[in-house]
Amino acid sequence: MDSHFNESANQNAPISFFAQLLKYLPKDWIVQEDKRISPKCNARKFSLWDQIVSLLFCHLAGCDSLREIEDGLISAVGKLQHLAAKAMGRTTLAYANEHRSHETVQKLYFRLLQTYKNPFRGHLDQDYLHPVYALDSTTISVCLSRFRWAHYRRAKGGFKLHTILDEDIQLPVVMNMTDGKRADVKEAKAAIEALGNKEITVVMDRGYNDYALFIWLTRRGTKFVTRIKENAKTTRLKDDVIEETDTYGDYGFRFTLEQAKAVCGDTRFRLVQWYDSDNDRWFEFLSNDFDLTAQQIADLYRKRWQIELFFKKLKQNLKIKSFIGTSEHAVMTQI
């Protein structure tokens, strides 16, 4: 009796935590996508599913090399068989990372996001008229001798991830990679257009101060909140007072600098001066949204810090600062 019980318990023992996580992936979709993008005559031993399993193992096990991934997967091959996954050799994985487009894995991410995003909702503690997104970029330094396409400075390599974070679920919905020299403002339009929806609110830091960007967003019906430049020339704020209190001032204004007038014309913007009692300082927020309260404008910019925290978590918890492949496809697939 005891012998039978032990044998039964052993058979029903849960597979590893890693294998349990893999069960949440849409394997059937991945297999079909693999058939769609791969030539029918190419009878490969290892599939897209095997590659994804290998890369997830790399992140969760903290592997720094292809050899570490190979050795780790071989040791877990018995448990991987439950999921019909094979341990890829380092040479095969390197080839797959270099030659398979990262767009397939990107599609997988968005499919997972659509399936599982509801449990992540609720980070916005107020109701806003439009979906709220934070726009920013982060630079990842790499060795220029190995990543020759990632020119950043004369003797330094690096690339930028131009990212848009959904503030309600605090997960990225856009992530475009460019070389490290690419200015944030120049990539802003492409990132925002990738969202599709125009009726949104975009929160961005002062690095995105650009008159052409402000008027482009306004004309397309997209709201924005950012910090105004300290040397910005505007009409007299006291001539267009929306509301004033001891802790904030709310004003309408127009840019008066010739360069700004040539781009923005007579377009009216909004300036919210907000007192931060915790740090005993004033902030000035620029927006084209006249429907939100001054408190909401200030709160939206405060929430922009979440994208900074996201970048920090990304670099600290996942294998983003060291890469197992040097091509652009390999890097973006790993990201």
Image (cartoon, rainbow, N blue to C red):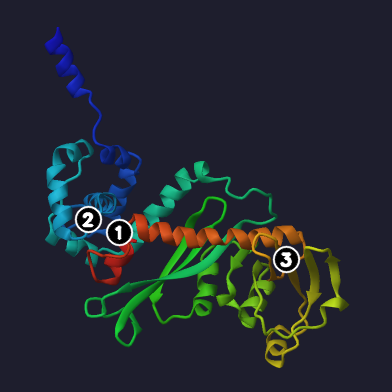
The crowd level at tag 2 (other Cα within 10 Å; few <14, some 14-19, many 20+) is: many
Considering the image in quadrants, where does the C terminus appear?
bottom left
- Asked if the residue at tag 1 contacts the one at tag 3, i.e. Cβ–Cβ closer than 8 Å, the answer is no
Say which residue label 1 marks.
319
x then y, percent, for residue 130? 66, 57
At mark 2, the secondary structure is loop
The crowd level at tag 1 (other Cα within 10 Å; few <14, some 14-19, many 20+) is: many
For marks 2 and 1, the one nearer the N-term is 2
The crowd level at tag 3 (other Cα within 10 Å; few <14, some 14-19, many 20+) is: many
Q: Is residue 263 left or right of residue 65?
A: right
Q: Is residue 292 visible?
A: no
Residue, x 18% and y 59% (percent of image)?
Answer: 93
Instruction: Please name the amino acid that badge 3 sits on.
Output: Trp
Q: Is residue 188 left or right of residue 128?
A: left
x then y, percent, for residue 264? 71, 83
Q: Nearer the viewer, residue 126 or 193?
A: 126
Dot label at residue 274: 3
Instruction: Please name the amino acid that badge 2 sits on.
Output: Cys
x then y, percent, for residue 261? 72, 88
Residue, x 28% and y 48% (percent of image)?
Answer: 31
x then y, percent, for residue 80? 19, 40
Q: Nearer the viewer, mark 3 or mark 1?
A: 3
Residue, x 67% and y 85% (percent of image)?
Answer: 231
At mark 3, the secondary structure is strand
